[in-house]
Image: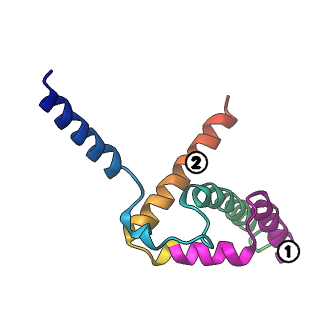
């Protein structure tokens, strides 16, 4: 392979790998926002809390989980990630206000994480 071919291959590979990063709409990211990867993991656990709450509602026909219990579950998950509720809410709003591809990418990651958790629970 010639030097020119190697250079072209490197440029193409570089372009391919950099195009697979998070959507460019995250360019205004700041330190007060939960990083994208952590937010994906955190949102997966939040989804589990909400799923549990919805399931108990469907079984009883009414909301049987006291709000204090739901808040305690949220606090436990947020504490595990070192995030308070205000930072979580600000981060969620930030990702929600970004380009639709950012939010779509976030929830795609959440679904993948939930599928991994489900798969691992059957092992």
Q: Position of residue 32 (x, y in %)?
A: 63, 73
Q: Which residue is mark 1?
A: 66
In the picture, the quarter occupied by the N terminus is top left
Q: Residue at x 37, y 65 (%)?
A: 24
The correct choice, above or below, for 29 with respect to 38 in the image is: below
Type of colouring: rainbow
- Displayed quadrant of residue 84: bottom right
- Displayed quadrant of residue 5: top left
Magenta stretch, overall SS:
helix
Q: Is residue 72 magenta?
A: yes
Which numbered marker is on residue 104?
Answer: none
Q: Residue furthest top?
A: 1
Neighbour tally class for label 2: few under 14, some 14-19, many 20 plus, Cα within 10 Å = some
Callout in the foreground (2, 1):
2
Q: Element at badge 2?
A: helix
Q: Element at badge 1?
A: loop
CA gap between label 2 and label 1 equals 27 Å
| Relative horizontal placement of residue 87, taking residue 100 as reference (left or right) | right
| Relative horizontal placement of residue 102, taking residue 1 as reference (left or right) | right
Asked if one can make out residue 100 in the rendered structure from this viewpoint, the answer is yes
The correct choice, above or below, for 7 with respect to 42 in the image is: above
Q: Which residue is mark 2?
A: 113
| Relative horizontal placement of residue 108, taking residue 56 as reference (left or right) | left
Q: Which segment did they paint magenta?
A: 67-94
Q: Is residue 40 magenta?
A: no
Q: Position of residue 14 (x, y in %)?
A: 29, 43
Sequence-first tag of 2 and 1:
1
């Amino acid at each position: 392979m010639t030097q020119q071919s190697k250079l072209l291959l490197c440029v193409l590979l570089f372009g391919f790998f950099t195009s697979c990063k998070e959507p460019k709409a995250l360019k205004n990211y700041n330190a007060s926002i939960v990083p994208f990867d952590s937010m994906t993991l955190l949102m997966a656990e939040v989804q589990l809390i909400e799923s549990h709450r919805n399931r108990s509602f469907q079984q009883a026909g009414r909301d049987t989980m006291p709000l204090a219990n739901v808040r305690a579950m949220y606090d436990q998950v947020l504490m595990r990630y070192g995030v308070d509720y205000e930072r979580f809410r600000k981060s969620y709003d930030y990702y929600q206000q970004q380009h639709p591809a950012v939010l779509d990418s976030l929830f795609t990651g959440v679904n993948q994480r939930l599928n991994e958790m489900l798969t691992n629970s059957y092992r």
